[in-house]
Image (cartoon, grey):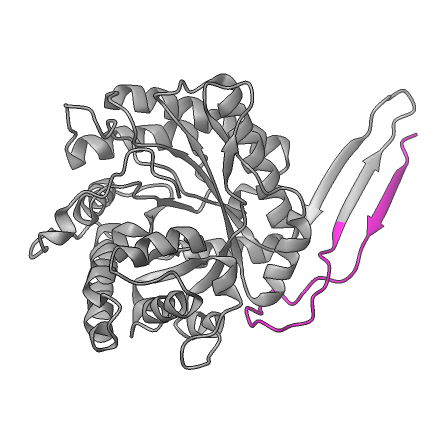
């Protein structure tokens, strides 16, 4: 006869709470092992205690007319943004800019989640209020960047891999206690460099391990294998690579028992390489991208939150709008950084008297992408600044 053993850990954290400062408890789980007399291996079935909360959080972020504000730039990258408007890279200046973003009046009408850098998760505004608390008041779910950046991948064609799995379990548990409810891990695939089978498998495996660890600690993982815009390749080559990448990603997500209903995706749109002479219309981008999603993404995934990847603010919005002209099995929305912040940052210019105007600019962009998520964006009245491309060859995030 088969025998079974059941192991349980401590009670689950109250799933209705998003409030930071609660006592941290380790997530509970069940492990069932069946041992048939003739079997040489055990069948393991895991049931995460955070499952209901993960699904609820994912659905909240993937709510109609809303998307994600990606403001998780590392301190070094944030320094580059500040330098573009003549400011020093100091904590005070980073704090001032992040305060401007999160306190924009009514931002939660268009933004459902905000990805933060670790410094920001623990930071207060210039007025002394916790940034996490400001977000929750705006009905915006706080998220956290958990990867440790890209490093060279030995044995590859000058490609990279994403580090950060060491200590991830303890870090995600601490981030949950601090108020974060979703996480982000960005890895990249380069078409001009191959991509090699090694690089694709490494990217997929790393994302899957990160996703499983994040879910075990109560955070909805955003799965982001960015296919870089760099290159002269056409849209068909991008589509071919994207099919391969996403098939690998979902294979390893399943191998790691990741709950698909409790994840969000952050893919690149299917576009030609930035240096390709043949440009694609928004309708072509939508057709190729939706074809990719239908072939590779299970309908159980609640949200597809596209990255902008160096597109202009208007281009990213037009492409998103084209994808929402008919119903989709998933919430198709945005997770933009530069495509939401570029004009806002330049409007601010580091001057206190420009904060209100900069916030209004941010709200204009957020509203435009909200309309695009609903398929109602027209592109009328856009500024010339918003139409400027932001692609940087070999861009380091």
> As drawn, which residue projects farthest toward the left?
381
Residue closer to the observer: 115 or 96: 96
Identified at 26% across, 28% down, the residue is 288
Q: Quadrant of residue 96?
A: bottom left
- Could you say where residue 373 lies in the image, as x and y percent from the top left? 27, 51
Asked whether, in this view, residue 214 is left or right of residue 41, the answer is: left
Q: Residue furthest bottom?
A: 127
147 over 349 or under it: above or below: above
- Left or right, residue 94 beside residue 373: right
**Is residue 23 located in the magenta-colored stretch of the structure?**
yes
Which portion, as a residue range, is magenta? Answer: 1-29
Looking at this view, is 333 or 344 the one in front? 344
Q: Residue at x 64, y 48 (%)?
A: 168
Whether residue 367 is visible here, answered yes or no, is no
In this view of the protein, which residue sits in the foreground, 214 or 292? 214
Give the quadrant of the C terminus: top left
Q: Residue 285 at x, y = what percent? A: 22, 33
Q: Magenta stretch mostly in which secondary structure?
A: loop
**Depicted 170 relative to depicted 311: above or below:** below
Q: x%, y% of residue 94?
A: 39, 65
Please provide percent x and percent y for residue 132.
Answer: 48, 70
Q: Quadrant of the N terminus?
A: top right
- Identify the residue at horizontal 7%, vertical 57% (top origin): 381
On whether residue 74 falls in the magenta region, the answer is no
Q: Nearer the viewer, residue 288 or 82?
A: 82
* Residue 26 visible somewhere in the drawing: yes
Q: Say which residue appears at 87% left-offset and 39% top-offset.
A: 4
Quarter of the rendering containing residue 32:
top right
């Amino acid at each position: 006869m088969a025998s079974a053993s059941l192991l349980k850990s401590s009670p689950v954290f109250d799933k209705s709470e998003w409030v930071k400062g609660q006592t941290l408890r380790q997530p509970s789980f069940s492990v069932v092992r069946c041992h048939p007399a003739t079997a040489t291996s055990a069948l393991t079935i895991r049931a995460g205690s955070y499952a209901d909360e993960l699904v609820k959080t994912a659905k909240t972020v993937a709510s109609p007319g809303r998307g994600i504000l990606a403001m998780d730039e590392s301190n070094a990258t944030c320094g580059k943004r500040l330098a573009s408007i003549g400011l020093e890279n100091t904590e005070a200046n980073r704090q001032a800019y992040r305060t401007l973003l999160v306190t924009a009046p009514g931002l939660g009408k268009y933004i459902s989640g905000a990805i933060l850098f670790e410094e920001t998760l623990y930071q207060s505004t210039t007025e002394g209020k916790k940034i996490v608390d400001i977000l929750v008041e705006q009905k915006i779910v706080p998220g956290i960047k958990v990867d440790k950046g890209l490093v060279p991948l030995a044995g590859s064609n000058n490609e990279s891999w994403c580090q950060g799995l060491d200590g991830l379990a303890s870090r995600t548990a601490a981030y949950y206690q601090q108020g974060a409810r979703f996480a982000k891990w960005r890895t990249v695939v380069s078409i001009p460099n191959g991509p090699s089978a090694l690089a694709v498998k490494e990217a997929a495996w790393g994302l899957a391990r990160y996703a499983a660890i994040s879910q075990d600690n109560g955070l909805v993982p955003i799965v982001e294998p960015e296919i870089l815009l760099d290159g002269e390749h056409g849209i068909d080559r991008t589509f071919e690579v994207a099919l391969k990448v996403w098939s690998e990603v979902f294979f390893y997500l399943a191998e790691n028992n990741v709950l698909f209903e409790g994840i969000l995706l952050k893919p690149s749109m299917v576009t030609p390489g930035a240096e390709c002479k043949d440009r694609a219309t928004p309708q072509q981008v939508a057709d190729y991208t939706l074809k990719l999603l239908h072939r590779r993404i299970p309908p159980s995934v609640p949200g597809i939150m596209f990255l902008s990847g160096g597109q202009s603010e208007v281009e990213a919005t037009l492409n998103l709008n084209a994808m929402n002209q008919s119903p989709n099995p998933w919430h198709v929305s945005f997770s933009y950084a530069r495509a939401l912040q570029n004009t806002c940052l330049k409007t601010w210019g580091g001057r206190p008297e420009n904060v209100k105007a900069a916030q209004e600019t941010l709200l204009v962009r957020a509203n435009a992408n909200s309309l695009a998520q609903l398929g109602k964006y027209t592109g009328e009245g856009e500024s010339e600044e918003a139409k400027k491309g932001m692609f940087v060859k070999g861009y380091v995030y």
